[in-house]
Image (spheres, rainbow, N blue to C red):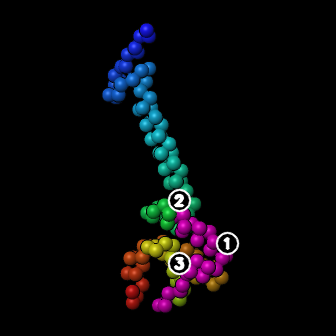
Amino acid sequence: MAKAKRRKLFPCGHRGQGQVCHRCAQEAEARNEKQSEKAQWAATFREDVVDLTHLPKNVVIKARHIINGLQEQQDYRRYKGKRLRHNRFVISIPVTRHYRLLCRDHGSLVVPEAVISHEDYNVCKPGG
C-alpha cells in the first residue's frame, strides 16, 4: 500500500504539495499579463491625433478607423458626417450612437478636433 502524501499549508493560506503554491503563481502570472496588456493599450494613445484616453475601447477603435480614413483623404460623408448648420466649417461624424467626432474643414483637408459624447455635443451646438 502506498503512503499518502502530506499536504502542507502555504503562507498564502492554500494547501498543497510542492515547494510553491501553484495557484498563487498562476494568479500572479495572469495579473502580470493583464498589466502588460494595459501598458500596451496605453502606449497606443501617444500616436493619436485626438485625445481618446477617456473613451471606451470600442469607441476608441471606431474613432481611430474614421480618423485613419480621413487622413487617407476619404470623404467624410462616407462615415455619415454632416456639416453643422450654424458653422459650416465644423463637421460632425457619428462614431457610435453616443459619441461624435468633430472635425474642421480646411478646404481640401478635414482635420479631426475632438471626440465628445452625444450629450456634450447637444449642449455645445446652438439650437440643440
In this figure, which residue is indicated by the disc labeled 2?
Answer: 45
> What residue is shown at x 48% (from left), y 61% (from top)?
57
Q: CA distance from mark 3 to mark 2?
A: 20 Å
> What residue is shown at x 49% (from left), y 72% (from top)?
96
Q: Mark 3 or 2 closer to N-term?
A: 2
Which element type, helix, strand or loop, lies under badge 3?
strand
Residue 81, by quadrant, is bottom right
Q: Does the magenta run of residues contain 84?
A: yes
Q: CA distance from mark 2 to mark 1?
A: 19 Å
Q: Position of residue 56 (x, y in %)?
A: 45, 62
Which element type, helix, strand or loop, lies under badge 2?
helix
Q: Is residue 44 above or below residue 29?
A: below
Q: Amino acid at mark 1?
A: Glu
Q: Could you tell me if residue 72 is visible in this image? A: yes
> What residue is shown at x 39% (from left), y 23% (from top)?
16
Q: Amino acid at mark 2?
A: Phe
In this figure, which residue is indicated by the disc labeled 1?
Answer: 72
Q: Mark 2 or 1 closer to N-term?
A: 2
Number of residues whose C-alpha sits closer than 10 Å to that of mark 1, classed few (under 14), some (14–19) or many (20 or more): few
Q: Which residues are magenta?
A: 60-87
Number of residues whose C-alpha sits closer than 10 Å to that of mark 2, classed few (under 14), some (14–19) or many (20 or more): some
Q: Is residue 9 above or below residue 100?
A: above
**Which quadrant holds the C terminus?**
bottom left
Number of residues whose C-alpha sits closer than 10 Å to that of mark 3, classed few (under 14), some (14–19) or many (20 or more): many
Q: Nearer the viewer, mark 3 or mark 2?
A: 3
In this figure, which residue is indicated by the disc labeled 3?
Answer: 93
Q: Position of residue 98 (x, y in %)?
A: 44, 73
